[in-house]
Amino acid sequence: MSEWMFERDAIRTFRFVRCAFDAQTGIARLVYAFDDGPELVETVTVPGAPFDLDDARAAAAGQALRLLHLVAGVSYYKAAVPADIRIEAYEIDADTAAFLETVYLNGLGEFAYRNGLDLRGRIRFPADAQAGAPAPALGLRGHALVAIGGGKDSLVSIEALRGAGVEQTVTWIGGSQLIAACAAHTGLPTLNIGRQLASQLFEYNRLGAWNGHIPVTAVNSAILAFAAVLLGVDQVVFSNERSASYGSIIIADDGSVTGEVNHQWSKGWAFESALGDWLQRHVAADLRYYSLLRPLSELAVARQFARVSRYDAHFSSCNRNFHILGERPTSRWCGVCPKCHFVFLALAPFMPKPRLVGIIGRNLLDDPAQTAGFDALLEYQDHKPFECVGEGRESRAAMAALAQRPEWREDALVERFRREIGPQLDAADLRIEPLLVIDDQHRIPPALWQTLRGQFAS
């Protein structure tokens, strides 16, 4: 028998082989395969073992583990995107299959666009199980696992929860030293969950696998939901604002709109509401999954962050710090990526100029070489970058605000906006105040929202 080789276009089936959790070690094993190829084994390690779970919590953990197995599989499925999907060790119901199809289709939207693939109608999860009884409440204790990514957004959530008296554990996945240092600086309990991808995936990439963006937040959300059940806590909190629900508008050469691709779909409201509802139906009725910043725009989050200076020397939103492979910047900010551009622009209206330039290391708005990057944020002759950045109207409003301020208006890119771009726009659409109004679409527990609403609105 010849040794199996990865040949992307010859692969017909993606298999969810099995998943298992060892409560004595805290290690979950997620196993996948293509056709009759070798097993691809991913591990997720939750600190705190051994875990002593009663029957109800063990059942809930099993449901959360299966969800994690199914959602994390997107990292491997995308290598060949075969039309046949099989689940071998258990069955799922129609509700779960529909949820997964939504996650894969939308979460792989940018991946499909960049690779010229059409995944509509291709992704079908087999729904062979009957719907079970609704999940019971487990009596989980009032405590939040708060995801931290090292950037401004999660720090705003952490400080808001601290101010509201919510017990919390600052949680992250993987080995980033930058995130670890930022988490330590909060002074709160921390939880660092390990995730090890199957090593063959990188070899498959070398052999021509399809590659590109996956819905990382969906995977991380499933990991934190599983950890919450193991630890017996009732809240999983992310820090995704309402701008995450809006994608990049794709315009054809003839000027027509061909569609929308959302790089951060799994940070958006559609995913948050779907996962939150699924967890309460299938895992635990008292497990709450929500984003604390959902009612806020990116600019409103930036305004909140600017009020606290304790993290100036510790946070970073520069994505080059978080690539699995490749070169990282020598400082916390590379100064040339879309995230650096947007964070600088979003903070500028709310922060003294010397403080902001000190954080980033230089004045990005006085560098003509950065023109194209900021034009993309403004959606001026380009679409919004495929990055976790705010809406084009937020960037335009921020730039218009700076154009009115003596300390900013003569900087190269602000002056260009004032002279060239601003006159083409309706002044009424450039006001920053309407973008700071809070929204009512969220899953925040009512009592907590009652406490925070006034703070976020001011």
Image: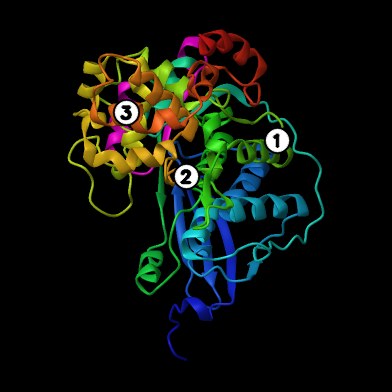
Circle 3 residues within 10 Å: few <14, some 14–19, many ≥20: many
Q: Position of residue 286 (x, y in %)?
A: 68, 28
Amino acid type for the residue under numbered disc 2: Gly
Task: Verify whether residue 256 appears in magenta.
Answer: no
C-alpha gap between disc 1 and disc 2: 23 Å
Circle 3/circle 1 CB separation < 8 Å: no
Q: Earlier in the sequence, mark 3 or mark 1?
A: 1
Circle 3/circle 2 CB separation < 8 Å: no
Circle 2 residues within 10 Å: few <14, some 14–19, many ≥20: some
Q: Which residue is mark 2?
A: 26
Q: Which residue is mark 3?
A: 344
Closest to the camera, between mark 3 and mark 1, is: 3
Vertical side of 424 occupied by 310: above or below: above
Tell me, for residue 393, which label it has, or none.
none
Q: Secondary structure at mark 2?
A: loop
Tell me, for residue 280, which label it has, or none.
1
Task: Verify whether residue 166 appears in magenta.
Answer: yes
Q: Earlier in the sequence, mark 3 or mark 2?
A: 2
Q: Is residue 187 visible?
A: no
Q: Is residue 14 visible?
A: yes
